[in-house]
Amino acid sequence: MLPTGGAERSRNNASPFLFQRTSTIAYGADPRFSYCLFVPPEIRKICVYAHGTYRDAAFFRDQLTGFAVSNNVLLVCPLFPAGLIDPWDVENYKLLRYHGLRFDLILLGMLDEISQRYAVPRQRFMLGGFSGGAQFAHRFAYFHAERLSALSLAAPGRVTLLDETLDWWSGLRDAEGLFGRAIDIPALRALPIQLLVGANDDDDITIAEDDPGWAPGANLAGATRRERLDSLYRQYRRIGCEASLEVIANCGHEWTPLREATIRFLEASSLAAK
């Protein structure tokens, strides 16, 4: 069990809005970014869940609160706003790098800040995300797998393949130079990975070459989210990752039908990490 004495002492002089279902809190190192939390009375684990393009961080926090309560999990839902630098941009965080910003490092900084505030030792954490959040999450795992205890990916639109013949973001050829870190394949292999997608999440999302987000090899994983997640799953299994793929019936590109499977995986991972 993680010590919570510091957090308990803080309760005596801190607003109740900073405990249990919190307000949205500015990230001290860069207040353009923020997060909302669920802080249980006793903290045993940490789980981060990343929003999609709509930036509905509080929705995911509220949907996962029951899981957090039952498992003594400190739940962290970061908010990466649209319109940073480019007022029309909605993609920024998904590829980790954007105009000099490193969203993987921003998340790690948030966790350091949260750990200090709530007296939680730095530890491995569960990470999940839906749609754009799953794009962020699987790319984060490539560079920080050693920090993770479980990874849940729900319906990412654009995936980065474990392909050393393609440049970032469709592949990994130049990734070490861009991020200053090599991908730790043994750590990735040791990570329980869940891949989720709706059976009807089959819209054609082929990326045109004149799309600002296009990269060579952008469509090699497939034309739909189902195809792309299946390509990612097969690559993970090929290198020996502990990955599972679940296709949810009667579900399109929506998270609510994926909620039960997400919680089941996170609960199993939380128990396994005890």
Image: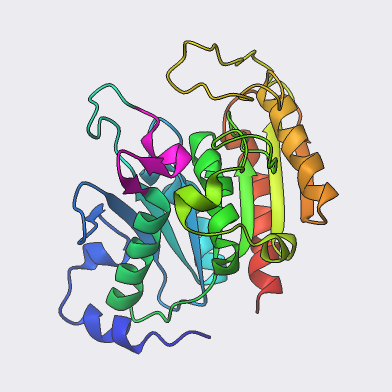
Indicate whether 129 appears above or below 199: below
Quadrant in the rendering for residue 204:
top right
Q: Is residue 25 left or right of residue 229?
A: left
Q: Is residue 42 left or right of residue 82?
A: right
| Residue 98 is a magenta residue | yes
Q: Which residues are magenta?
A: 90-102
Q: Position of residue 207 (x, y in %)?
A: 56, 16
Indicate whether 121 appears above or below 69: below
Residue at 49%, 50% (x, y): give it.
177
Residue at 24%, 57% (x, y): give it.
27
Q: How is the image coloured?
A: rainbow
Residue placed most toward the observer, 224 or 258: 224
Query: Furthest residue to the left?
Result: 13
Residue at 54%, 71% (x, y): give it.
124
Q: Position of residue 180 (x, y in %)?
A: 47, 57
Residue at 62%, 44% (x, y): give it.
153
Indicate whether 52 appears above or below 241: above
Quadrant in the rendering for residue 157:
top right
Q: Position of residue 254 (x, y in %)?
A: 57, 29
Q: Position of residue 45 (x, y in %)?
A: 52, 72
Indicate whether 13 appears above or below 83: below
| Residue 61 is a magenta residue | no
- The quarter of the rendered structure image containing the C terminus is bottom right
Q: Is residue 155 left or right of residue 11?
A: right
Numbered marks: total: 0
